[in-house]
Amino acid sequence: MLPAMNLAKRMSRLGTETAFEVLARARALEAKGRNIVHLEIGEPDFDTPRNIVEAGKKALDDGFTHYGPSAGLPALREAIASDFTTRRGVEVSPDQVVVFPGGKPVMFFMILALLDEGDEAIYPNPGFPIYESMINYVGAKAVPIALREENEFRLDVDELAEKITDKTKLLIINSPQNPTGGMLTSDDLKRIGELAASKGIWVLADEIYSRIIYGTDHAHDTLMKYGDTNRICVLDGFSKTYAMTGWRLGYGIMPTEFAPHMARLQTNATSCTAAMVQMAGVEALTGPQGEIDAMVAEFQRRRDVIVDGLNALDGVTCIKPHGAFYVFPNIRGTGLKSKDLEHRLLDEAGVACLAGTSFGSEGAGYLRFSYANSVANIEEALSRIGGFLEKEAAKA
């Protein structure tokens, strides 16, 4: 018998991201010869644009293979600051930028830097599961704020005000949102910013899907316009917008005084972000954007296909998301539980998706589908789901 590992107690408070677990199960079925339609993982199915790939290769040839500053290479910090200023309409300086190997370290390090045991942090539910996981990991209290379908999965600011106590130190918001595709309006952001500022609360604004927006009625806006910029950190990155998930490149925009603390955490954890990857990031921001616009247009086409297809299924309703590349259909009319349906669709229908409860208790009665897949595969998945539900109805 192997000896007990005697893990630190805090490890029992660490969660996971179910998408990777379902992906592993789906891959195991494929290894046995099953055909699986993948709608579980939040990853663009497009290749990284060629100009970005070539910039990364050139950086290798040019010797960008050594350590760099923990906060990021000056060239990339300058490009990020310029892009943020232009696109968001809020002027920021390179000193406010810290570059990380992916977007997750922004939330990880910010929570480590700010929260002590006994502090409270408010996070969206349903929401990206790592928020709650990291709050719990550091020993703080995770306080959920419900996102409801009747409000297009937008945060209710009046309800938020009721959640705030004298122990509240951090609020996390995400727009466009994972898993629902919901978006906060400019009025929502203004009220959130004013409320957080009046209470002296830090805010992590996760804007990783800021470029994946559909239509002209729902333009992206940023909390940086409305809140106390001395207590706001905006998370963004390259994975979703530029189909660069495997490159691991993200960043935070934060108060100048806070940036060295985030960089110091990076020094202790990863030293720095890979230099050649950062040079590819410079090209992503400063090079042609046509492929990105085309990718978003294709996501919109897929969104319309999957929303219409889900609404045509008995027992399923689905509102149309305004951003990101997820739908969050209500499946209560099927009479099946979210987790049961997740498992059975994979095992019996060959469709990989996620239970809404993978994103928190408020996700009960929902599934999440990522439509970062071809229209042909989405239509095949809808056909398989329809066939499965018809068989279930016939049993009743």
Image (cartoon, grey):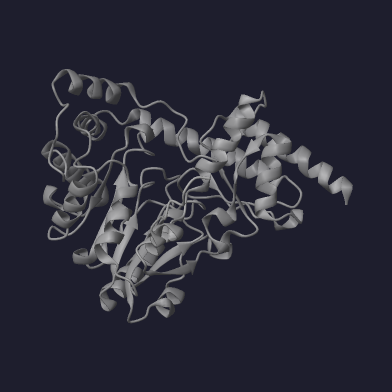
Residue found at the far bottom of this picture: 166
- At 62% from the left and 55% from the top, the residue drawn is 366
- At 46% from the left and 75% from the top, the residue drawn is 159
Q: Nearer the viewer, residue 248 or 317?
A: 248
Residue 110 location, quadrant: bottom left
Residue 260 position within the rendered picture, expressed as x and y whole percent measured from the top left: 13, 54
Q: Is residue 139 above or below residue 31?
A: below
Q: Is residue 185 visible?
A: no
Residue found at the far right of this picture: 395
Q: Nearer the viewer, residue 33 or 82?
A: 33
Residue 185 position within the rendered picture, expressed as x and y whole percent measured from the top left: 40, 61
Q: Is residue 179 above or below residue 153?
A: above
Residue 230 location, quadrant: bottom left
Residue 246 position within the rendered picture, expressed as x and y whole percent measured from the top left: 37, 32
Q: Is residue 193 left or right of residue 278?
A: right
Q: Is residue 257 left or right of residue 373?
A: left
Residue 216 position within the rendered picture, expressed as x and y whole percent measured from the top left: 42, 47
- At 42% from the left and 73% from the top, the residue drawn is 160
**In this figure, what is the number of numbered marks?**
0
Q: Is residue 21 visible?
A: yes
- At 55% from the left and 64% from the top, the residue drawn is 148
Residue found at the far front of this picture: 1
Q: Is residue 121 above or below residue 290?
A: below
Q: Is residue 212 left or right of residue 277?
A: right
